[in-house]
Image (cartoon, grey):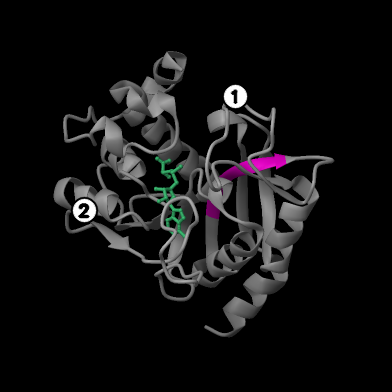
Amino acid sequence: MRQDARVTASWIRRPYAGPLPPAGLRMGGEHFQDDEAFVATAARDVARLEARAGLSAESSLLDWGCGAGRLAVGVKARLGAVREYHGVDVQPALIEWDRAHLADPATHFTLVDVANARYNPGGERAAVIPATDRSVDVFYAYSVWSHLDAADAAAYLRELARVLAPSGAAMLTCFVEDDVPAWQENPAGYGPLAWEGALHCARFERRFFESLIAAAGLAVVRFEYGGETDGQSLYVVRRSAGAAASAAATR
Ligand SMILES: C[S@@+](CC[C@H](N)C(=O)[O-])C[C@H]1O[C@@H](n2cnc3c(N)ncnc32)[C@H](O)[C@@H]1O
């Protein structure tokens, strides 16, 4: 995992000396415990968003399931700032830390009290992304669909389609495989970890997940198999041609 940091350190353009979250608040994998990897993987993802989703300093960027602000650190370490960075999460301790240490006029965080069996079991039974229709140029969700049940996965893809700007793009990661059940929780013998507790690993059958993407009015423009944390795959999606046309017509 140290290799991750070495390989990606070149993505950092503005050496980052700002605050980093304490170990106990870092979500999403052992390798993020390493400070260098935490910053470098974030700067790498900002670079990937630039190359694959058109992120620029002028963009509005929604970091859904932002955790302890890893991508916000990456923005500061690579671009300095974007027009608007908006981090959203369901865990109060994380959003409190983010607000106290990373917020600035272009960087803000929202706590949403929606249910997730792993991260916020007592939350409201609703699937809401707090952003207005077609307002998001670039949407990022690293290791969030990897912790959703099938109903929420579909509902949040519809939410993504709602908030994405007509020319916007989203990059997300999740566990997908061919020839497995449509959705499974904590599949035994799968991946590098012994999955424990609700929604530690939510795995989708690839065609099923892509059918949810299509049903939401989105289209896959890029798929990279298995290269992300714990073997997750990466998708870049945009509005499908029909959905983009109807969004344009209603502007
Ligand atoms: C594995 S962590 C990834 C954190 C971050 N994306 C990163 O890469 O460092 C998943 C995050 O998604 C958040 N999350 C889960 N369900 C959510 C929901 N419905 N709305 C917003 N955030 C959610 C969790 O609280 C957690 O912080």
Q: Is residue 83 above or below residue 227?
A: below
Question: Residue 123 colored magenta?
Answer: no
Q: Amino acid at mark 2?
A: Glu
Q: Residue at x 63, y 40 (%)?
A: 186
Q: Amino acid at mark 1?
A: Pro
Residue beneath label 2, please? 96
In this view, the residue farthest toward the bottom is: 250
Question: Residue 171 colored magenta?
Answer: yes
Q: Is residue 157 above or below residue 32?
A: below
Judging depth in this view, the residue of 70 and 79 nearest the camera is 70
Horizontally, residue 33 falls left or right of residue 203, namely left
Q: Position of residue 144 (x, y in %)?
A: 51, 49
Q: Position of residue 66 (x, y in %)?
A: 37, 49
Q: Residue at x 54, y 42 (%)?
A: 200
Q: Is residue 198 above or below residue 112?
A: above
Q: Secondary structure at mark 2?
A: helix
Residues tagged 2 and 1 counted as in contact (Cβ below 8 A): no
Q: Which residues are magenta?
A: 170-176
Q: Residues within 10 Å of mark 1 (few under 14, many from 20)?
A: few
Q: Earlier in the sequence, mark 2 or mark 1?
A: 2
Q: Secondary structure at mark 1?
A: loop
Q: Position of residue 180 (x, y in %)?
A: 80, 42
Question: Is residue 59 visible in this depiction of the protein?
Answer: no
Displayed quadrant of residue 208: bottom right
Residue beneath label 1, please? 192
In this view, the residue farthest toward the right is: 179
Q: Residue at x 40, y 69 (%)?
A: 130
Horizontally, residue 220 falls left or right of residue 34, namely right
Give the spatial CA distance, label 2 vs label 1: 31 Å
Mark 1 within 8 Å of ligand 1, using the beta carbon: no
Question: Is residue 194 visible in this depiction of the protein?
Answer: yes
Q: Position of residue 211 (x, y in %)?
A: 76, 59
